[in-house]
Amino acid sequence: MRKVISVLLVILMVSSVFAGGSGERNSVESYPRKTVNFVVPAAAGATMDILVRGLDESLDLGQPLAISNMAGASQTLGLAEVASRPADGYTLTCSGAAGTLIQPLLLDLTYDFDDFRYISLLNDAIPNAIGVSASSPYYSWDDIQAALDAGETIHFTSPNTGSVGHLAALNLINQIENGEHASYVSYNGSAEADTAVMSGDVDFIVNDVDLIMDRVNNGQYRCIMVLSDERSDLAPDVPSALELGIEGMSNFMGMTWIMIKADTPDEIVSYIKARLDEAIGSESFTDFLATMNKQPTRVLPEEEITEILRNAQEAYKSVIDSL
């Protein structure tokens, strides 16, 4: 009798294991069954938010996409929230360098780089550029270098401390002669930093080239250098850093990418990525990017995106470690 009961128990245990596996497969195969949430770790109306809402017009996941904003602490509040949610494919998020690559090097956060999978580029790499006020006495980088060589103090800024622009500026200053005469001034966001440049409180700003060129086109700035190895299509008449003998700026570019919890089932990630890549490569989203003065986004494998971001984080770490 005991032997019969033991055999029955074994059969029940085995059956429950197979039932559980089947349930998991059915869950994956039926994805998505409900609304998919997209947490934007930036304020409504920010560039990242506009990009996500623009993509939503071209994206079909098979269920509605509910976009919510959770801004604060250089994107880390929203990303920490996403990191705390189940890895079931029903929460997506996006990030720039600040939230995923830079802040984890500076702070003890509840997440790190390996807690996510990086599945699509929302916008491609945008180089930083140096902008000066339209009334500035500096018309070229040579003018600024001459001032530094003469022992003058040059003040510079970026939209946010710890941003890609900030680290790009520091990487630049670390390479040039008499960079010790350059002094960083911190402001709270783009509006304050722009005001400081135009009022002459600081000599130059480092920001995304598209944002710098918006100011140029409005007659508020001059763009004197693009911090990349090649000239930008957005500023074809402006020399690149490499042309001026400054190397290693290719990792210091603004990008936004879409990501999901690292332990989300592969089948779900593959489904989401295929739909995202279709939308991102569509003519409608390309046209939308053009309205924002941004170039078309590359559709890349997850592994290649991850490698690009790891290399960028190593570049940021080298600058932070040198401070």
Image: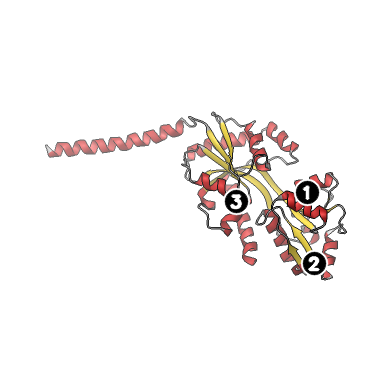
Which is more toward the observer, 17 or 190? 190
**Residue 43: numbered disc:** none
Closer to the camera: disc 3 or disc 1?
A: 3
How busy is the neighbourhood of tag 3: few (under 14 within 10 Å), some, or many (20 plus)? few
Rendered image quadrant of residue 172: bottom right
**Residue 73: numbered disc:** 3
Q: Amino acid at mark 1?
A: Ile
Q: Secondary structure at mark 2?
A: loop
Residue placed farthest to the left in the image?
Answer: 1
- Disc on the earlier residue, 3 or 1: 3
Which residue position is annotated with label 2?
A: 153
Q: Position of residue 72 (x, y in %)?
A: 60, 48
Q: Position of residue 84 (x, y in %)?
A: 48, 46
Which residue position is annotated with label 1?
A: 212
Q: Is residue 280 left or right of residue 139?
A: left
How busy is the neighbourhood of tag 1: few (under 14 within 10 Å), some, or many (20 plus)? many
Closer to the camera: disc 1 or disc 2?
A: 2
Q: Secondary structure at mark 1?
A: helix
- Disc on the earlier residue, 2 or 3: 3
Q: Is residue 154 above or below residue 78?
A: below
> Can residue 156 be seen in the rendering of this structure?
yes
Which is more toward the observer, 20 or 107? 107
Distance from the alpha carbon under mark 1 to that under mark 2: 23 Å
Rendered image quadrant of residue 10: top left
Q: Secondary structure at mark 3?
A: loop
